[in-house]
Image (tube, helix red, strand yellow):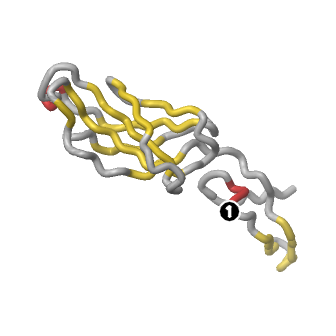
Amino acid sequence: MNPENVTTMSTDSDSMVITWQELEQQQFNGPGFKYKIYWRQASGRSPHWKESSASNPPFIVNGTGTFIPFEIKVQAVNELGAGPEPDADIGYSGEDLPLEAPSEVAVTELNKTAVLVRWSPVSMESVRGHLLGYKVHYL
């Protein structure tokens, strides 16, 4: 069997941290146990997988660029052979600060205690991560 819950948890904008749930020692099924980690950009630019090995998570890939989708998979391997071919999951390299702020900000007074704030959203290319929302600051 292969590890489950393969995911990315990246905090640096130019790297990707791949993690997974480790197998129990009785699941190693032979000597020389390790994990083979595979990754490639999900955009289809490279048909070839990059690979490395590790004895435990996490595994860090550097030089990935900011918020790039990757296909990732982790396979259990020992001296007797490899586990089944794992399915690929999608993970992302680290996020960074947005490149632009909303434009065309307008405020309309509704009454003495309420206002309506409108704006044009930022382009998705400028977000460089998951858009979680907008913060409205007032004085």
- The quarter of the picture where residue 94 lies is top right
Q: Quadrant of the C terminus?
A: bottom right
Left or right, 85 with respect to 20, comes to left
- Picture residue at 20% right of the left edge, 38% below the top: 83
- The residue at which mark 1 appears reads as 124
Report the amino acid beneath label 1.
Met
The residue sitting at 83% across, 79% down in the picture is 110
Residue 3 appears at what percent x and percent y? 27, 39
Is 50 on the left-hand or right-hand side of 27?
right
Residue 114 at least partly seen = no
Direction from residue 34 to residue 6 in the image, left or right:
right
Q: Is residue 112 above or below residue 39?
A: below
Q: Where 111 sits versus 16, above or below?
A: below
Residue 7, percent across and down? 41, 44
View extreme (bottom): residue: 110
Residue at image position (66%, 52%) is: 128
Q: 138 or 1: nearer the eye? A: 1
Q: Position of residue 34 (x, y in %)?
A: 28, 26
